[in-house]
Image (cartoon, coloured by chain):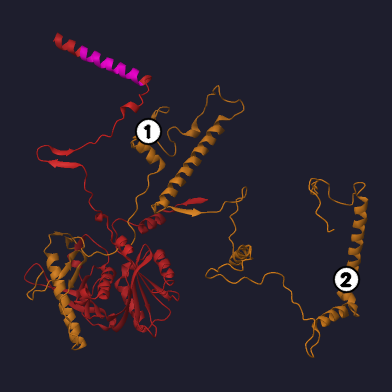
Chain colours: A red, B orange
Amino acid sequence: MLEIRTPKTGKAKRVLEKRAPKLVETGKKTLILHGTKTSATVSSVLMELYRLKKGGAIKYSRRNENIRPFESGGETSLEFFSQKTDCSIFVYGSHTKKRPDNLVLGRMYDHQVYDLIEVGIENFKSLLSFSYDKKFAPHEGTKPFICFTGEGFENVPELKHLKEVLTDLFRGEVVDNLNLTGLDRAYVCSAISPTKVFLTHCALKLKRSGTIVPRMELVEVGPSMDLVIRRNRLPNESLMKEAMRTSKDKPKKKEKNVDQDAVRGKIGKIYMPDQKLGEMHLPDKSKGLKRERKESKKLQEETDSKKKKKSSE
Amino acid sequence: METETDQIYHLDVGNLLGFNPNHRFPSAPSSREELVKECLEESRKLVQAIANALFNFTSTETNDGPIVQLPPPTTKLPREKHVPRPKPPTKWEEFALKKGIQKRKKDKVVWDEQTDQFKRRHGYDRVNDDNDVPIIEAKATDEPGEDPFAKRLDEKKKRVGKQQKNRLQNLKAAEKAGALPSHVQLAATSLPISGTKSQPKKIGKDELGDVAGLAATSTASGGKFDKKLPGEKAPKKQGKHHKYLPVVAGRGAVNPEKEQTNNVLSKIFSKHSHEILNVGKAINMYNVKKEKKKSGRSDKSGRSDKSGRSDKLKPKKDITKKPANKAK
């Protein structure tokens, strides 16, 4: 016995429609949570990341004991939360003896884990420890510049993966129109070694220069940390293909049987199947044929009358 | 974009992303501050490059500032959710396609012949309202006792029910294709007991466990050799719960079974045995039993008033069934 359930309020309906899969997607929401044990650095990293992504992030404050992203059974809670909050990127922080100050960045496709990357945090400097002129503090929700430096990002596969995940994390919404006065932050990621990435958040200072383009200057404001690559899990091929598929990717089907000619224009050939005339059934002669005869008679009469008129004129 | 040092940056202006693949950091870092400075300087160059491209776009002036049209991003990132799947056509849509029926736009307001004014098509005070017909003329095919108004109501109910059924079938087909509309959920419900409007009672955890246990042991081997599902608990002790005391006593130990029976007997024969055994009740029970036996014997000849039940309520004995084979 199936029952059709529809939302009873307009608000509920709008929420459901927001969460439905769309052709062109808006920004991904981030879920920030932590495991059984967190150190001071991990908890402050998670807090500051939440502040940086204020509009599009949800932070859970309770500890989650049964989440183990890299184990096969430990992802069910994450998938449930992703479904509940409609988030497709998550940041999971934890601290163990084996993996101190651990951060797992992961992405979801259709609320199933798509890929994971695990980094360790070193040399963390919090937002509050930076002193700068408050005029230049970046506003909330502005679109950031993202800069990657270093050949590691191209040569080392783990760093390549990290680059993709960080782009996804910091990107925010994809917009068509950008207000040039609203450019005030930049994320700086540099591959200082094949396993380490230096990440920091800077405010932008636009200084007057001779041309239309102002001179850009970076002032370090936000948290800065060193990320040490630990483990990663790439998505499997079929899932990756499906997730990377966009609506414009459909291969252009070659129109068969159509020819363009300069003399005749667009021509096509019509292939008629063999009309087995011997086996054809004749149509039902009763009313249709009578009607046809009447109509043809009428036409004849009309043409005759026209001819008469013409001849009379 | 090439700089003087002939470095090519990979720029993705749509994402405000810049990548410099050619910079090599010294493997032995000079000092932390030097390293940070170097990173910031390199990134500054990247940001400048992106800004060069951005500010050179044609901008439209608004109150908030110059607005620029961003190009679409070039880095390919995975989607969040699947591409929306096409909905399979409904039964009506298939039929309309086959017959070549076009959709016609209907007006909200229709001219009503009877009252010579415009009335709305649906809703309060509508055109051709089914409930408003004053007179229904009798046809030759009508039966005398039938109420035509009630008949109309019935037909409407049937039509509505048919429509609901068709809607459900269409949604099921859409769900199968993975294209259920976002605001609709198909939920499995249990049928209510006919005649009652009560909600089916929700089964608790313990009850479910009991039922699961019953189901598990109802196999030919009593559920002994079945694979256990993850999370399934071992069954509670099944069968009769007896504690059999050992008959033969151990060395020096008291015979426990003998002890037990002795205790029971001593309690009955003791001075205060009237407190344990309710003699009055025992006598009453004995008497009632005796009387029933007597009345049972006299009942074979005629009906007795002492038995309160009438023959109609007693389960009738099936004479076709043969009596069970008694032990020979």
Q: Which residue is mark 2?
A: B278
The structure residue drawn at horizontal position 74% and vertical position 77%, both measured from the top left corner, is: B243
Residue nearest the viewer, comparing A96 with B126: A96
Q: Is residue A257 above or below residue A27?
A: above
Q: Is residue A207 left or right of residue B184?
A: left
In front here: A82 or A13?
A82
Q: Position of residue B118 (x, y in %)?
A: 38, 32
Q: In the structure shown, which secondary structural element does the residue marked by tag 1 occupy? A: strand
B59 with respect to A250 (left or right): left
Q: Nearer the viewer, mark 1 or mark 2?
A: 2
For the question of whether residue A117 can be seen, the reply is no
Q: Which mark is residue A34?
A: none
Q: Residues within 10 Å of mark 2 (few under 14, many from 20)?
A: few
Q: Residue at coordinates 46% horizontally, 47% vertically from top-left?
A: B168
Query: Eyeballing the image, is B54 above or below A119?
Result: above
What amino acid does circle 2 point to?
Asn
Q: Which residues are magenta?
A: A288-304
User: What number of labels is visible?
Assistant: 2
The image quadrant of residue B147 is top right
